[in-house]
Image (cartoon, helix red, strand yellow):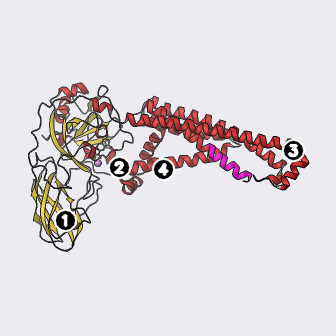
Amino acid sequence: MDFTSRRSVVGAFNGFATLAAGLGVALLAAAVVRPSAFPLLAVADSVVDMTPEPVKQWAIRTFGESDKLVLIIGVIVVLTAASLALGRLALGRLTVARWAVTVIGALGVAAAVTRPDSAYTDALPTLIGIVAALGALTLLTRRAELLLKAASARQEAEPADAGDTASADAEEAGAAEGAGARSARVETVDRDRRRLLVAGAGTLGVAAVAGGVGGALFRTLNVDPASAAAALPRPARPAAPLPRGVDLPIPGLSPFTTPADDFYRVDTALIVPRISPEDWTLRIHGMVEREVELTYADLLKLPMFEHDTTLACVSNEVGGDLVGNARWLGASLADVLRMARPRAGADQILSRSSDGMTIGTPVQTVLDGRDAQLAVAMNGAPLPLGHGFPVRMVVPGLYGYVSATKWVTELKLTRYADERAYWVDRGWADRAEIKTASRIDVPRSGARLRPGRVTVAGVAWAQHRGVDAVEVRADDGAWEEARLAQVPGIDTWRQWAYDWQATPGTHRLQVRATDGEGRTQTGEETPIAPDGSTGWHTLTVTVR
Ligand SMILES: Nc1nc2c(c(=O)[nH]1)N[C@H]1C(S)=C(S)[C@@H](COP(=O)(O)O)O[C@H]1N2
Ligand SMILES: [Mo]
């Protein structure tokens, strides 16, 4: 190997080991201090904030639910490229390379301490990581320089022996010069190579152990200990048991109640906030007569009631699965608002989560008598961390991004004209009622079926208006009325089924719903932005 490429390989290796040491140690520190203080996550979070909206939309369209993973991989790729180059730069310009590491680290520190929910201690994992990286880079670079010097001295003295294979020429040169000097040079090279390898292996070992222990801690910390141990208050007003017949016995049909584990999750949190109920408070302020602050104990003293509400995401495409139904237990959001006595003119509740998400909800909607909740439980268990533990908002009839604030810690009474919530700032509508929608769950798109009776079934929703009818048609034929399952109220989705006589051939199946106000779902196709998709779910099946 020639000298320049040897420098490149050694430099790249040093750079890689430096990055590994820095990140491994930072991961371990973050697991102890706070998972979201891990610099990679903090940087990724900041990148999300700084990314222009069109790029973000493109990323969500292209990568869907794995957009965060793709982002983190992107950050790792950029960091790796930078560190390989820095490792090479350090050979000869160690000071410059150390400054570069420090500057990159400082960006990580800046990201970690400027997250909406961060504390100054969040700088620690990155600082410790920087120290580890600088130590590794210095050690490895010094050892590498010794090795490269010894190797080049040997090469100069024994030009014919440039390769690793001894040649007759080299033997002659060695004989002419004296075997002693030659073997001393070989020994020096061997010793320096060994030392570099030991340092390199040691650095990677430290990185692997720290990273491994940190990673394991991360996983155990994310298993929901707080949520699992939280006491479940007893409802003052329990919901009646679900009517018999909310679930039609049809395989493949979405169950009426979505288990928490299967419930769709949409949020901007790379690491879910972990708030212990003892530390949680809710501040109600802004355009109010009386500012109020509630603790978790205060909240639980309010009359708790259960309500079945179907949540839906504005990003749900026609036929999509960003919708789910649960039985929520919580206090009345309207009652809590009234405690603070909103002033006339306040038309928006700007709620804020512990991680800085802001969501705007119409005051009028929350106060109109619907069962809007500050929920603490879902399907008979404390809220899972990912669904907003310890407290989240649930407002029947509104898309999640304008109502369903998870990890909520603040309600500010304000005016739509004065303040804009997170997604509204990014081009989404400031008010958005859920549009009437329906979905075919069975048969699946592309299914191959036998001729004869085929049960077509699915769910339809028009929260707070209710679903009064569902119709199905095949191949642009007449719309046929489906049978409807029972529902506990107007705030949930409703199962439906239709027995279709399938004849051989390829067929197009479509569904549409009519809400409780007599309005039939439009077939006009509109995209999810700015306030939710419309159109009839359509799929093709083959019968033979
Ligand atoms: N703190 C916080 N709350 C949030 C969000 C978020 O990003 N952060 N996303 C909202 C959106 S867009 C939706 S659709 C619902 C989804 O609730 P789920 O994840 O429990 O299904 O949460 C809402 N609440
Ligand atoms: Mo959403």
Which residue occupies 31% across, 46% down? 266
Which residue is identified by label 1?
510
Q: Select label 2 or label 3 by which is in front.
A: 3
Q: Residue 426, how many percent across, how many down?
A: 35, 49
In the image shown, does 93 or 510 lie closer to the viewer? 510
Q: Residue 139, how many percent across, how many down?
A: 66, 36
Q: Which amino acid does label 1 sit on?
A: Gln
Q: What stretch is highlighted in magenta?
A: 1-14
Which residue is identified by label 3?
179
Rounded to the nearest angstrom, the CA distance separating label 2 from label 3 is 75 Å
- Judged from the image, the quadrant occupied by ligand 1 is top left
Q: What element carries label 4?
A: helix
User: Is 119 placed left or right of 150 in the picture?
Assistant: left
Chain-order first, disc 2 or disc 1: 2
Chain-order first, disc 3 or disc 1: 3
Query: In the rendered view of the protein, which quadrant contains the C terminus?
Result: bottom left
